[in-house]
Amino acid sequence: MAGHYGLFRIESAAKAERVAGHIQDYMGFTVAGPGTFLASGHPGDSRTTSPHLGLIRSTDAGRTWVTVSESGTADFHALQPAGDMLYAYDSQTGRVRSSADGGTTWTSGAKEEVIDLAASLAKPSRLYATTASGLRVSTDDGASFTGVQGAPLLSHADSPAKGVLVGPDAEGRIQTSRDEGRTWQAGGTLPDQAVAFTAVDDSRLLAAAEDGTVYESQNGGGDFRVVFNPATS
């Protein structure tokens, strides 16, 4: 679990341990592979010369980090790997950006007010963005976007399989599409509005609330249980 004060390993519903004691503000975070994390945000030490971490990578589950690119300039609030592509939303420029080399070099794309990004390994050129005005889709690696007609207003989205989109709507209900956003089915409702969301696969969904509570569903959003409650830690 990545937060404003570090990366935490959840050990039980009442216990989370900060990884390696690092205090950093993770504004964007994603799991890129076994033990491999990508992140962005701000350093924990305000005395550092740069307020922006750019893109950083860990290959040991968050114990150590190295800078990949954009140190001092980019603050990626959303990171989305998809096959050989990596997508990001840079809050400093307001643009979606894409990289075909793991984030070393970037191509600047459309200017959008992005909340979250979603893309499938099976169809990496098709990128979705949740925005305050609705769900939007790009078919050109983020260079341009159009609205997804008839889609619910989603706060977050993920695409765990080709054609599948899943995320919570404005009321916290889990909405799922299996035909690239043409039709939707409503599922269960999160106990709190999500500030972070991920779909591990079609069945396992994870969401975090503003107060740090983490919820998990193992039936595609039919219902949720608490896997971490900061009030009891």
Image (spheres, rainbow, N blue to C red):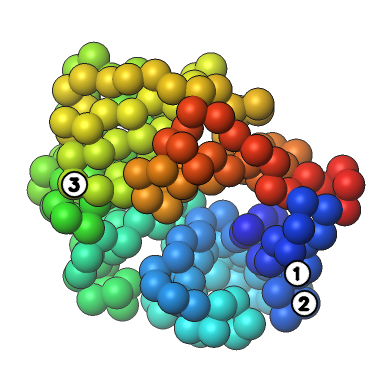
Which percent across, then down, holds residue 94? 38, 45
Find the distance from the CA under tag 3 to the CA under tag 1: 34 Å
Residue at 37% in and 50% down: 201
**Who comes first in sequence, dot 3 or dot 2?**
2
Residue occupying the point 73% across, 64% down: 11
- The single residue placed furthest to the front in the displayed view is 219
In this rendered view, identify the residue nearer to me: 193 or 52: 193
> Residue beneath label 2, please?
21
> Label 2's element?
helix
Q: Looking at the image, can residue 16 be seen? A: yes
Depth check, mark 3 against mark 2: the one in front is 3
The answer to whether one can see residue 98 in this image is: no
In the visual, does 47 lie left or right of 138?
Answer: right
Q: Position of residue 133 (x, y in %)?
A: 36, 21
**Above or below: residue 53 compared with residue 109:** below
Percent across and percent down for residue 97 are 28, 56
> Are the residues at dot 1 and dot 2 in contact (C-beta closer than 8 Å)?
yes
Mark 3 crowd level (few <14, some 14–19, many ≥20, 10 Å Cα): some
Identify residue type, mark 3.
Lys
Q: Tell me which residue sits at (44%, 22%) in the image.
A: 187
Q: Can you say whether 158 is above or below 29 in the image?
A: above
Q: Which residue is mark 1?
A: 18
- Marks 1 and 2, how far apart at CA: 6 Å
Name the secondary structure under disc 3: loop
Q: Which residue is mark 3?
A: 162
